[in-house]
Amino acid sequence: MTQQSESTTTTTTTDAEDPASTSPLSSPAFAPAVGTPSAGPRPLAEPRPLGERRVWPRSFADRLTAPLPGLSGFARFAREGALRPGPEGLADIPRLPYEPGPLPRVDARTVAVSWAGHASWVVRIGGLTVLTDPVWSRKILGTPARITPVGVAWSALPRIDAVVISHNHYDHLDAPTLRRLPRDTPVFVPAGLGSWFRRRRFSHVTELDWWEAAELGGVRLDFVPAHHWSKRSLHDTCRTLWGGWVLTASDGQRVYFAGDTGYGHWFSRIGARYPGIDLALLPIGAYDPRWWLSDVHCDPEDAVRATQDLGARRMAPMHWGTFVLSAEPVLEPLTRVRTAWEKAGLARENLWDLPVGASRVLN
């Protein structure tokens, strides 16, 4: 099965790998697309029907930007790797910014974001309330408990109009949190992940491939590529897709949620196809050791570069200060992203480095 995905109604083709990409891979097995890149932005795809049942490839491993670690990588990690900071790196946990507050009042013309922690945002756009990768659990499989509490109480949430999921890793797809939602909540997920939700009796599930879109209440939801991977059990590596979401209101206001991703060529492609991104929600944590994680997790400097590649007007950091997933000191992502932003000559007011629980309204 090639990367050309099959559907019960139509066939989807994704962008081709740019021959000038800095990716070290030249193997056809890792070429992430069919076709050739165009000279300019391509027309956006027509929105697909909500709840459409699709037939997908058995594996999306050919979408990987880089191969997953092999035996030599695991051997090196066993010798020298560390996935937790030492005592000095954990000492700043009490200093992590945590300032929960009320959700802002909004109307259909207002865009506002509230950071619940990690990759979980309450996005208000086009009159809708959208949750991204909702994780309200205190602990997830394979990690210590949260080092900051959830910033937005579940009881404080308004009615949820939609949920978008970036991929199936446990820190982004949390079954206990999702069980709190009404089963008729519209859920938008990567290709291949729909069955996971339907088994849990969600009745409005829309699966999308890269560069595909759906529309809900006048808001367009586009699923876009990311430099990452998927796995939830011993035998399902890359069986479902991964990516980010571009949310566009009817008046053109646009928010990009990157999900989980390393740095690479997709950011400039996304920016070209979706110009005028008002706010990019980008990951800045879980990056050390770099030799182990650079292909799948941005570091703070990568996130600033990605913001520039996207042409985004503002950036809000995420994916740090919530779960200890890697070896960098817990406060380091914040200090480094501020330094990188200043070095890039970007306006300080456009870096929305929010405390957990805080909100900002797009003017």
Image: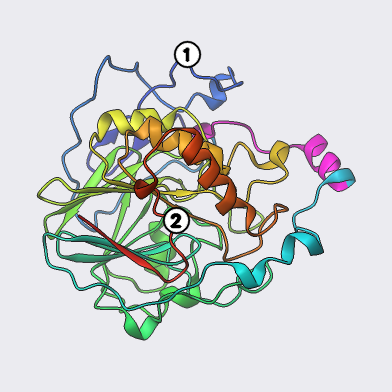
Question: What residue would you read off at disc 2?
Answer: 353
Q: Residues within 10 Å of mark 2 (few under 14, many from 20)?
A: some
Which range of residues does the magenta coloring cover? 62-78
Q: Is residue 238 visible?
A: no
User: What is the C-alpha distance between the residues marked 1 and 2?
Assistant: 33 Å
Question: What residue would you read off at disc 1?
Answer: 20
Where is residue 49 shown, x and y percent of the image? 18, 51
Q: Residues within 10 Å of mark 1 (few under 14, many from 20)?
A: few
Amino acid type assigned to the residue bearing label 1 in the image = Ala
Q: Quick check: is 352 in the magenta stretch? A: no
Closer to the camera, 57 or 47?
Answer: 47
- Residue 160 to residue 298: above or below: below
Where is residue 261 shown, x and y percent of the image? 51, 43
Horizontal side, residue 119 vs residue 44: left or right: right
Q: Is residue 10 visible?
A: yes
Residue situated furthest bottom in the rendering = 155
Amino acid type assigned to the residue bearing label 2 in the image = Asp
Closer to the camera, 58 or 117?
Answer: 117
